[in-house]
Image: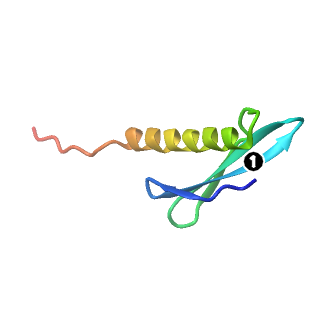
Amino acid sequence: MDSTPIEYRGCELSVIVQHRAGEFVATLLIERPGGVRRAIGPMRAFPTAQGAANYAIECGKAQLDDASVMRGPRVAVSG
């Protein structure tokens, strides 16, 4: 099962779900502007394909949120 890509924070998130030994595992693809793509996974197993896909998307969003926080707003300091 492949998911329909979603846009989040300027990136495209998509999921590939595979059925393995009676469970479903997902691999997340994050495509940044300019076409740079990164794969994360496979992630933990779930009893349903939708559960695996939802988990992967939420992990991707959290990772992009953390990256945004790490960059943070630039603040000018005057002395």
Residue 34 lies, in percent from the top left, at 52, 67
Task: Return the x and y of residue 66 as percentages of the image width and height.
Answer: 45, 38
Is residue 67 rendered to the left or right of residue 18?
A: left
Q: Residue at x 66, y 44 (%)?
A: 53
Q: Nearer the viewer, residue 74 or 40?
A: 40
Crowd around label 1: few <14 · some 14–19 · many ≥20 (10 Å): many
Residue furthest out toward the bottom: 34
Colour pattern: rainbow
Q: Quadrant of residue 37?
A: bottom right
Residue at 44 percent across and 41 percent down: it is 65
User: Horizontally, is 8 left or right of 41 in the view?
Assistant: left
x and y, in percent, of residue 2 in the image: 72, 56
Disc 1: which residue: 17
**Could you tell me how many numbered marks the image carries?**
1
Q: Position of residue 30 (x, y in %)?
A: 59, 53
Q: Is residue 22 above or below residue 7?
A: above
**For the residue labelled by badge 1, is the local secondary structure a helix, a strand or a loop?**
strand
Which residue ends up furthest to the right in the rendered image?
A: 21
Q: As displayed, is residue 76 above or below residue 9? A: above
Could you tell me which residue is drawn at 67 percent across and 38 percent down? 51
Residue 67 falls left or right of residue 36:
left
* Nearer to me, 71 or 60: 60
Which quadrant holds the C terminus? Answer: top left
Q: Identify which amino acid the numbered label 1 is placed on.
A: Val
